[in-house]
Amino acid sequence: MPSHALYPKLFSPLDLGFTQISNRAVMGSMHTGLEEAEGGFPRMAAYFAERAAAGVGMIITGGISPNEEGGHGAKLSNATEADQHKLITEAVHAANSDTKICMQILHAGPLAPLDPVAPSPVRSRISPVTPRELDADGIQKQLYDFANCAKQAQIAGYDGVEIIGSAGYLLSTFLVEKTNRRTDEWGGSFENRMRFPVGVVKQVRAAVGDDFIVIFRIPAMDMLQGGMSKDEVETLALAIQDAGATIISTHFTWHEAMVPTISTRVPRAAFTQVTGRLRKILSIPVITSNRINTPEVAEDVLVRGDADLVSMARPMLADSQFVAKARDGKANEINTCIACNQACLDHTFTGQEVSCLVNPRACHETVLRPQPVIEPKHIVIVGAGPAGLSYAVTAAERGHRVSVYEARDEIGGQFNLAKRIPGKEEFEETIRYYQVMMQKYGVELHLNTPVSVEDITALKADHVVIASGVAPRHPNIPGIDHPKVVGYMDAILGLKPIGERVVIIGAGGIGFDTAELVSHAGTSAALDIEVFAREWGVDFANHPRGGVTGVEPQVETSGRDITLLQRKTSAIGKGLGKTTGWTHRIALDRRGVKMINGVDYQRIDDEGVHLLRDGQPMTLPADTVIICAGQEPVRNLYDELKDQGISTSLIGGAFESHEIDAKRAIKQATEEALII
Ligand code: FAD
Ligand code: NAP
Ligand code: SF4
């Protein structure tokens, strides 16, 4: 079926008067690390061009600072820097003359690492540095620098700029009282507090003329206690419109806010209702965003009238062909962003180059290039977890003949456990994607087929890939075979009863997930916007200050008494994802889960778990003890096949079980399948 019948709104053009956007799909801004990397611009050009060629209506680049004080590397303030950007704009326009590309201007303000500036010397909770207060001349300089940066972007060939006025960066810190304590014309009343952001838009418009897209990213609901009120947001939006913005893009949250807004535990399109309300009072188009990861959801948002354009940032990392597949009626082939943040945002916040857990080619388009094979091989893969599946699909797409043998009755490996955790339902999408792609590329799949060395040898394959994953570790604690001891697999699959008093041994990712599951009751917040709002204390309907002021979070719990244990003395949950770990800790804390570190296990018996802490004996009464003590590789087949001289490789958890996650498993498998 043609795209216009399936997603008529998504694929309708938007007329801006002086130009048109060919469809409503916007690739939202993401800092990738390539902005500052040596040789990063040609890689960025290829990364954006691949998405443009697939038909994205408008691309917004990662944030570029207008001056030294505004950022941590990439800046645009002169002609030499503008020349570098021409690589991007020329590549995008050559790939698709209909795609618009706008550069985001990001002045980090108090979040800049060196010599940060701000309206007032108020340190952010997430920054180690107190910013320097801008004096009147300093403010004028910033205004000039924004206008100059926009002009340079225009010279570089961009179709427009996006000015970020949210997230705790410079512009937004003028807007709220807690970060703007000025008593001059730039502080005090809301009219004064919005003077700087509105001034930026006016100066930018004056610098670039009428026929240039100027997008303003507004903090539509900042999720801050004492943040912006609904009236203030509306007043600002109208003033920004009057100042000459072409489009307003709604943003939710500051980086320091305590509500998750993009992680996998957030329901799809949870925030678009806020954009929808704002859209009603504006005459210029609005962009909405956050957890819109399928064309169906994007279309629904547009049909509801919540927005004129839909920004999908991470979904375009996960699948560069998102728009083309939707357009061509092949949405089931889209590799869906599961909102894990593991290879994108977590990388940004730990200074690593961005990529994508489900698509390691993201931001590596020039490095990882699938080439058709000249002499196809017959490849046998043992194990249909994330590693085996990504190897199978990548190798088969290149032209190899691939057969996959899986012991269980379903593909997906441990993702079948992950998807059962409340808040991780999206993991099912990855399994769906592989299922569809295996069919598309003719991978032969044998379920319910645990294979032995003899079975494999009889297949006479050209190459064997062992992707047999991991087995749970059985720690050597006296009483480990007591009937009340349950492995995490049985606990998650519901194969063993779980009592009222639960002790969990091991506080890694799986310990946390298991605690989330057994402490949970009712509907998963990730599947219901109202439950999400209740759990995280957000009042979407009334929009008190920040959307959260005075709203108490309320969670439903299973009522179980749960304790999570770890031997290390480090903080529990320290190893979890940089941008999501805090949400896991808060979620368990609100459900009353106790966490104890620095323990030395003594034994498990009828009473419960006996341990030493600081040398002192302690007994934790327990009806059920769940073991989440890490894993060991399953690699016996590999060793035996190697001994027989059979061409064999080892990937995923079977290769290295220590800290194995899907990001590493899929990356390794993809890289190896690209070169066989
Ligand atoms: P596996 O997923 O273990 O797959 C191996 C497959 O091989 C299995 O299907 C098995 O049945 C099959 N097999 C084994 N032996 C044979 C044989 N002889 N013949 C045929 N088939 C065989 N990772 C993340 O990155 N992010 C997360 O948020 C995350 N959450 C998780 C939550 C839970 C509850 C769990 C349990 C894991 C989670 N993980 C997460 C970890 C992630 O799932 C694993 O790292 C990943 O699945 C490893 O992939 P793999 O393909 O190497 O192994
Ligand atoms: P893990 O993160 O390595 O944690 C294992 C836990 O078991 C640790 O708390 C460890 O801490 C404890 N442990 C290890 N050996 C033990 C022993 N002999 N006796 C008792 N305790 C022992 O592994 P995991 O939780 O099994 O997770 C596996 C992988 O899946 C991880 O690498 C993780 O990245 C991934 N995963 C990720 C997420 C996510 O949200 N990103 C979620 C789930 C899983 P002590 O030794 O200090 O007790
Ligand atoms: Fe989405 Fe995870 Fe990929 Fe980031 S790493 S784009 S959140 S699937």
Image (tube, helix red, strand yellow):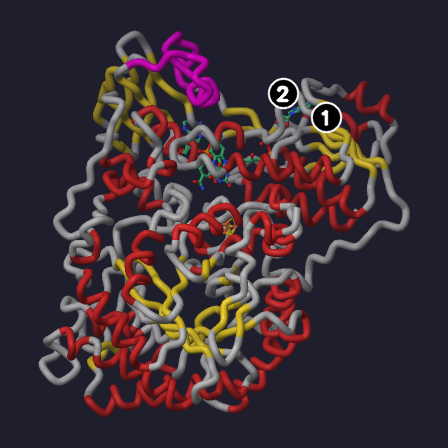
Q: Is residue 486 magenta?
A: yes
Residue 602 place in picture, x, y as percent: 33, 19
**Residue lying farthest right?**
375
Q: Which residue is mark 1?
A: 405
Q: State yes or no: Cβ of the residue under disc 2 lies below 8 Å from any atom of ligand 1.
A: yes
Q: Which residue is mark 2?
A: 408
Q: Secondary structure at mark 2?
A: loop
Q: Is residue 296 magenta?
A: no
Task: Please tell me whether the stretch drawn in magenta is mainly helix, strand or loop.
Answer: loop
Residue at (41, 22) in percent of width and height: 627
Q: For the magenta stretch, what is the residue range? A: 477-499
Residue at (48, 57) in percent of width and height: 312
Q: State yes or no: Cβ of the residue under disc 1 lies below 8 Å from any atom of ligand 1.
A: yes
Image quarter for residue 309?
Answer: bottom left
Is residue 159 positioned above or below 643 on the image? below
The crowd level at tag 2 (other Cα within 10 Å; few <14, some 14-19, many 20+) is: some
